[in-house]
Image (spheres, rainbow, N blue to C red):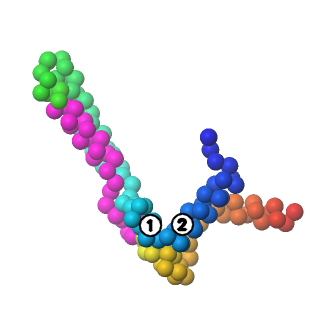
Amino acid sequence: MPLSEQEQRLLDEMERNLYRNDADFVSTVGDRRGRPTYRSIALGSVITIVGAVALVLGVVLQQPIVGILGFGVMLAGVMVAITPGKATAESARDSESFASASTGGSAKTSTTFMDRMNDRWDKRQDDR
């Protein structure tokens, strides 16, 4: 069940307050290393498919060691696919802006499209 606009705004406000007031907690709990890259997803998918083929081959040939190795390769492929990529310049910029915002710096916080739309909607409602 999706959140209503009011609940989403409240959640965003709580998150901003958490970032502002408890930066140490956020930095230890919210370790944002990045997202998986397309390259790692593609490579992990190929490795997973090779592992699945080895698993099926182990079952067909009735060789348990081949099946076990196939399962291990499949598991490794999934891990490669979901592992986040290395930090990029964008994530470094985000961490710098987070650090300056948490220390009370005057860095301009970027707002999302939905935040801007919600602000515009609120202004229209206030004008009525």
Residue 25 image point, x, y percent: 44, 66
Front residue of this view, candidates 36 and 46: 36
* Predominant SS of the magenta segment: helix
Q: Is residue 70 at least partly visible in the picture?
A: yes
Quadrant of the drawing holding the C terminus: bottom right
Quarter of the figure with residue 96: bottom left
What residue is drawn where x is 22% and y is 23%? 56
Q: Is residue 117 above or below residue 62?
A: below
Q: Amino acid at mark 1?
A: Phe
Count of labels in the image: 2
Q: Is residue 90 visible?
A: no
Quarter of the image for residue 109 reads bottom right
Q: Quadrant of residue 46?
A: top left
Around disc 2, counting alpha carbons within 10 Å, would you say few (fewer than 14), some (14 to 19), or many (20 or more)? some
Q: Residue at x 20, y 37 (%)?
A: 73
Mark 1 in CB contact with mark 2 (< 8 angstroms) = yes
- As rendered, which of 40 and 20 lies closer to the eye? 20
Q: Which residue is mark 2?
A: 18
> What label sits on residue 92 in the rendered view?
none
The magenta stretch spans residue 29: no
Q: Which residues are magenta?
A: 69-92
Q: Quadrant of the N terminus?
A: top right
Question: Relative to 85, does residue 2 appear above or below in the rendering?
Answer: above
Looking at the rendered structure, the kind of residue marked 2 is: Leu
Determine which residue is flagged by label 1: 25
Q: Position of residue 28 (x, y in %)?
A: 39, 65
Is residue 76 within the magenta segment?
yes
Q: Nearer the viewer, residue 94 or 39?
A: 94
Q: Label 1, secondary structure: give it.
A: helix
